[in-house]
Image (tube, grey):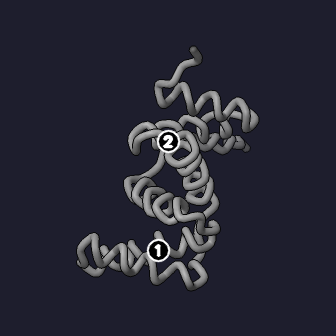
């Protein structure tokens, strides 16, 4: 009997929804909100946009949602939000570079690198080199 080895999971990168969610998460995080409130804000914004509302309404719904507990958030999305926020808020990277940073860091982590190595890989992915 032949046994097949399960294929190693490969990093697919964030979906457009993951990226948008991380941007809303970071929007809330900039105000100093805890992670739970940031996830609730992102979920509130998604509900507003899914219902066909405009960005101003999404901001209102996101703001109101911060007072409530968030729904469940998958681990991969939580990790992506953390790395994206680090790049966008702490490192002050523009949106596209912060996404590249997060994706590069996560790829490195999934490859077995520690968090310091992942940070360096994220910087390289964002096009930031030591100087």
Question: Could you tell me how far apart the alpha carbons at marks 2 and 1 are, in whole angstroms?
Answer: 24 Å
Residue 10 at x, y percent in the picture: 57, 40
Res 69 → quadrant: bottom right
Res 53 → quadrant: bottom left
Eyeballing the image, is 15 above or below 52?
above
Residue 119 shows in this picture: yes
Residue 102 at x, y percent in the picture: 54, 42
Q: Which residue is mark 2?
A: 92
Q: Which residue is mark 1?
A: 43
- Secondary element at tag 2: loop
Between residue 97 and residue 11, name the one nearer to us: 97
Residue 83 at x, y percent in the picture: 59, 47
Q: Which label sits in the foreground, 2 or 1?
A: 2
Residue 77 at x, y percent in the picture: 56, 58
The furthest residue to the front: 31
The furthest residue to the right: 114
Residue at x 59%, y 68% (from the top left corner): 33
The furthest residue to the top: 131
> How many marks on residues?
2
- Secondary element at tag 1: helix
Residue at x 50%, y 46% (from the top left corner): 88
Within-10-Å neighbours for mark 1: few <14, some 14–19, many 20+:
many
Res 23 → quadrant: bottom left
Is the C terminus in the top left, top right, bottom left or bottom right quadrant? Answer: top right
Residue at x 28%, y 81% (from the top left corner): 51
Is the N terminus in the top left, top right, bottom left or bottom right quadrant? Answer: top right
Between residue 67 and residue 19, name the one nearer to us: 67
Eyeballing the image, is 87 above or below 127?
below
Residue at x 62%, y 72% (from the top left corner): 36
């Amino acid at each position: 009997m032949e046994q097949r080895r399960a294929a190693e999971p490969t990093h697919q990168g964030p979906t457009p929804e993951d990226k948008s969610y991380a941007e809303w998460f970071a929007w809330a995080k900039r105000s100093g909100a805890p992670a739970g409130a940031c996830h609730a804000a992102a979920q509130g914004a998604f509900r507003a946009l899914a219902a066909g509302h405009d960005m101003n309404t999404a901001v209102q719904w996101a703001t109101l949602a911060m007072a409530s507990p968030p729904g469940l958030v998958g681990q991969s999305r939580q990790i992506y939000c953390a790395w994206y926020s680090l790049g966008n808020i702490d490192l002050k990277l523009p949106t596209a570079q912060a996404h590249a940073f997060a994706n590069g860091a996560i790829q490195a982590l999934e490859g077995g690198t520690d968090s310091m190595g992942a940070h360096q890989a994220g910087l390289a992915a964002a096009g930031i080199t030591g100087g």
